[in-house]
Amino acid sequence: MVVTQRAARAVSATALLAGSVVLGTGAAAAVPSAAMTPSALPGASARPDASALSDASALRGASALPDASALPEPFAGIAPEADVSHHGHVLLWGAGLKVRMRTENHGPSSLTGVTVRVRISVALAGRQELPQSCLRADRRTVLCRTGSLRADGVQERRLALELRLAGRPDEVVVRVDTLWNGGATDRNPRNNDHKVLAPATGDEYVF
């Protein structure tokens, strides 16, 4: 029997088609019946399992609401704010230097106390009579505490210093400022940091 090339190609094509049909049938038979259900098909609108919804909701809630113990303390580490002011006058006559001042707190936070620093451009005499709330820090510096200050600006602390100088200068420069205020932030330092030039005229020079 003689088979032409055209007939051979036709026979081969027929065999390939038959094999494809057989393989396709076998593959379909090997797929589990569960995989052919509507819920397994792409785009199917099958209802999800209730337990899966519960787990997903729990996960979303856990990521949105951190543990309360991990939250920082409200306003932790934020310093209070207080506007402290010192105002008064300086008088120089001979070897005597008078310093009068009042200290106020304009808030918004109350303070347990303030330390006022008074520095003089010349040396003080060896012996000084200071108020009980004051002490001599060095040859030219006196420190005074005020006591507590409410934040309403009504309460004030008054200070009177009668200082003796080592000599009889023609003039002195007096510097008044806040050394300590309990760690509060003062956004208006201009009203508690003063430098006053006082000639020896016996007149009051205001700050």
Image (spheres, rainbow, N blue to C red):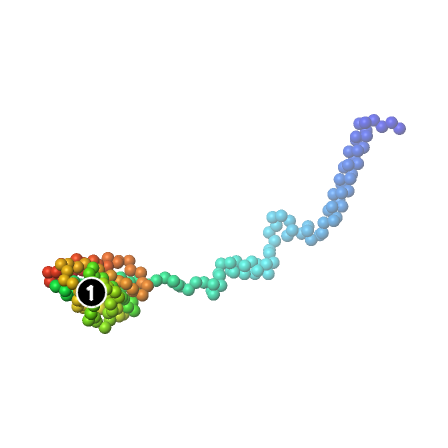
Q: Residue drawn 29% across and 67% down? A: 111
Q: Which of 70 and 164 is in front in this view?
A: 164
Q: Which of 131 and 76 is in front in this view?
A: 131
Residue 181 horizontal/vertical position (percent): 29, 64
Label 1 belongs to which residue? 124
Query: Could you classify mark 1 by the number of other residues whose Cα lies within 10 Å: few (under 14), some (14-19), or many (20 or more)?
Result: many
Residue 57 in view, yes or no: no
Instruction: Give amino acid for label 1.
Output: Leu
Does residue 99 appear left or right of residue 38 in this picture? left
Q: In which quarter of the image is the C terminus?
A: bottom left
User: Helix, strand, or loop for circle 1?
Assistant: loop
Q: Compared to 21, does 71 lie above or below? A: below
Residue 105 horizontal/vertical position (percent): 25, 65
Q: Residue drawn 89% across and 28% down? A: 1
Quarter of the image holding residue 186? bottom left
Q: Residue drawn 17% across and 59% down? A: 172
Does residue 18 appear left or right of residue 160 in this picture? right
Q: Which of 46 and 175 is in front in this view?
A: 175
Q: Residue drawn 77% across and 42% down? A: 22
Does residue 95 appear left or right of residue 34 in this picture? left
Query: Tag count in the figure?
Result: 1
Residue 203 horizontal/vertical position (percent): 11, 61
Q: Compared to 169, does 24 lie above or below? A: above
Q: Which residue lies furthest to the bottom in this view?
A: 132
Quarter of the image holding residue 187? bottom left
